């Protein structure tokens, strides 16, 4: 029996995000500390048994890849799927003409919510298809990733990273002091470009010299030890996200009231996360907070930082995902 390949696609939070000016290509400069977390989508890849499988099931969206007859099944995402683009790009760049594949994505990372779910799925799809093509860890993945989106390169081998440029400059960062996270997804969605436009309207972007100074402070703090100075735990996109989605304010307040040392919006929002510093006690506190808030925030969950091993491709001989 052909093995099924399985991989997790971690969502991410931005422990900080400093917004700079718009570049010539229209994208904003930013400096961010991006942390992959255990709240993750689940992906399985296997050859399509026959062309008959292309019919999609009710409630699921299906988008065939241009470079093959691959099928993506991903409930909750309508329209083109970034993971489909990833499969097509891999086939095109590597000239891989393996059998049509079925990629199934179980979404757990909130959609259009500032946690990089689409980019994470695209990166995981690259890891999976390279494996299926017989080239696990194919260096071509790193070359393909930037063409799929500025946030994809950082998710190819998920790890805490200092991100620059418009998201495409990714440098590994030493782990922070132990902590757990409380994640409060919103019922609303925010379009990333709309949040950046709102940030411009609110004049949130900082001047180039200020961005350079903040980056230098962040680099020094990362080198100095595992603590992250609270004054650097800031997201410059937060005012714009709150302006477009006022219910964020209550979520920030709820996370703080539940015991989070810091609460902020992740990326372009509207997901809010709280930080609980410490080991097992912090994990228990984040889990307790999530349970207490689940009535008001149905997707409330506790999470923890993860690394590339968490996201590695696994072979499932019997077919079912682990
Ligand atoms: P960004 O990475 O721009 O910050 P985000 O994290 O806020 O985005 P995503 O969940 O990645 O949000 O979704 C952004 C848009 O991408 C959605 O509106 C959705 O239609 C589209 N999309 C395409 N593929 C996917 C996918 N696999 N998962 C989620 N969204 C996807």
Image (tube, rainbow, N blue to C red):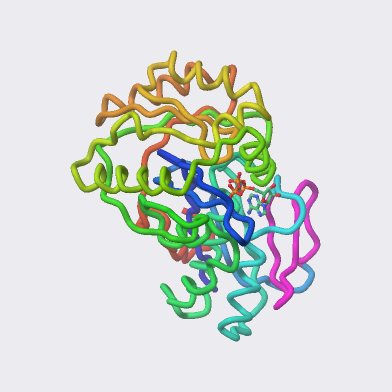
| Closer-to-camera residue (200/36) | 200
Q: Principal SS element in the magenta part?
A: loop
Residue shown at the point (33%, 57%) measured from the top left: 172
In this picture, is 163 found above or below 97? above
Highlighted magenta segment, given as a residue range: 53-74
Foreground residue among 186 and 103: 186
The residue at 40%/39% (across/down) is 15
Look at the picture and state if 176 lies above or below 277: below
Front position in the image: 191 or 216: 216
Check the image and name the residue furthest to the top. Answer: 257
Q: Position of residue 118 (x, y in %)?
A: 60, 53
Which x, y percent locates residue 71?
A: 70, 66
What residue do we see at 57% from left, 57% from top?
A: 23
Looking at the image, residue 223 sits to the left or right of residue 210; the answer is: left
Q: Residue furthest left?
A: 224
Residue at 38% over, 33% down = 233
Q: Is residue 59 on the magenta stretch?
A: yes
Above-or-below relation of 67 to 244: below
* Residue 195 rendering spot, x and y as whole percentages: 64, 39
Question: Is residue 281 part of the magenta span, yes or no?
Answer: no
């Amino acid at each position: 029996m052909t093995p099924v390949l399985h991989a997790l696609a971690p969502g991410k939070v931005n422990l900080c995000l400093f917004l700079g000016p718009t570049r010539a290509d229209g994208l904003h400069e930013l400096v961010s500390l991006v942390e992959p977390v255990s709240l993750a989508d689940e992906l399985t890849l296997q050859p399509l048994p026959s062309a008959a499988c292309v019919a999609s099931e009710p409630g699921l969206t299906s988008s065939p890849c241009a470079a093959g007859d691959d099928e993506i099944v991903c409930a909750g995402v309508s329209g083109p799927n970034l993971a489909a683009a990833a499969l097509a790009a891999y086939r095109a760049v590597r000239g891989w003409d393996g059998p049509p594949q079925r990629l199934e994505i179980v979404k757990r990372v909130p959609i259009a919510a500032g946690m990089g779910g689409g980019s994470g799925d695209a990166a995981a799809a690259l890891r999976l298809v390279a494996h299926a093509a017989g080239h696990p860890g194919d260096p071509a993945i790193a070359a393909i990733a930037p063409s799929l989106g500025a946030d994809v390169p950082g998710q190819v081998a998920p790890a805490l990273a200092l991100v620059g440029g418009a998201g495409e400059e990714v440098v590994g960062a030493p782990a922070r002091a132990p902590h757990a996270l409380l994640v409060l997804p919103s019922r609303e969605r925010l379009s990333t470009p709309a949040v950046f436009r709102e940030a411009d309207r609110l004049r949130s972007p900082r001047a180039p010299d200020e961005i350079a100074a903040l980056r230098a402070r962040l680099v020094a703090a990362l080198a100095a030890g595992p603590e992250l100075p609270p004054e650097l735990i800031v997201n410059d996109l937060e005012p714009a996200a709150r302006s477009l989605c006022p219910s964020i304010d209550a979520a920030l307040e709820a996370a703080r009231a539940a015991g989070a040392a810091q609460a902020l919006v992740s990326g372009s929002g509207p997901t809010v996360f709280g930080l609980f510093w410490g080991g097992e006690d912090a994990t228990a506190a984040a889990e307790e907070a999530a349970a207490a808030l689940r009535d008001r925030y149905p997707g409330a969950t506790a999470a923890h930082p993860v690394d590339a091993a968490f996201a590695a491709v696994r072979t499932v001989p019997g077919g079912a995902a682990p």
